[in-house]
Image: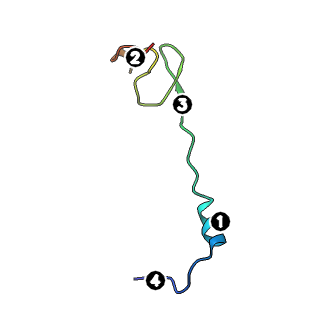
Amino acid sequence: MAVPKRKMSRSNTRSRRSQWKAAAVSLVSCPQCRSPKRPHVACPSCGTYNRRQVIEPSA
C-alpha cells in the first residue's frame, strides 16, 4: 500500500483542494409554463412532469 513519505505542506494541500468546486445546478425551462426547473424533476410551479399533471402546484 502506498504511504506518503513526508507530510504535505499546507500550501500544497490548499492548492490541491482549490480545484474542488461545487458545480452550479443545471436548469431547463418547463415545456408547460416555461419557468426554470431541474431536469428529470416535476416542475414546482405548475406540477407537471413529462406533460402530465403529477403533483399539486406549490403556489
Give the number of the mark in front: 1 or 2.
1
Q: What element carries label 2?
A: loop
- Kindly indicate whether the residue at mark 4 contacts the one at mark 3 (C-beta within 8 angstroms): no
Q: In this view, does 47 lie to the left or right of 15?
A: left
- Kindly indicate whether the residue at mark 2 contacts the one at mark 3 (C-beta within 8 angstroms): no
Q: In which quarter of the image is residue 52?
A: top left
Local crowd size for mark 1, using a 10 Å CA cut-off: few (<14), some (14–19), many (≥20): few
Q: How far apart are the two marked residues, 3 and 1, measured between alpha carbons?
A: 30 Å
Residue at (54, 18) in percent of width and height: 35
Local crowd size for mark 3, using a 10 Å CA cut-off: few (<14), some (14–19), many (≥20): few
Q: How far apart are the two marked residues, 1 and 2, measured between alpha carbons?
A: 44 Å
Q: How far apart are the two marked residues, 3 and 4, measured between alpha carbons?
A: 42 Å
Q: Is mark 4 on a helix, strand or loop?
A: loop
> Disc 4 marks which residue?
3
Between discs 3 and 4, the one toward the N terminus: 4
Q: How many labels does the image show?
A: 4
> Disc 3 marks which residue?
27
Residue at (57, 40) in percent of width and height: 24
Q: Residue 38: percent from the left, percent from the top?
A: 48, 30
Local crowd size for mark 2, using a 10 Å CA cut-off: few (<14), some (14–19), many (≥20): many
Q: How far apart are the two marked residues, 4 and 1, measured between alpha carbons?
A: 21 Å
Q: Which residue lies furthest to the front in this view?
A: 10
> Disc 2 marks which residue?
47
Residue type beneath disc 2: Gly
Residue type beneath disc 1: Ser
Residue at (45, 12) in percent of width and height: 59
Q: How far apart are the two marked residues, 4 and 2, measured between alpha carbons?
A: 53 Å
Residue type beneath disc 3: Leu
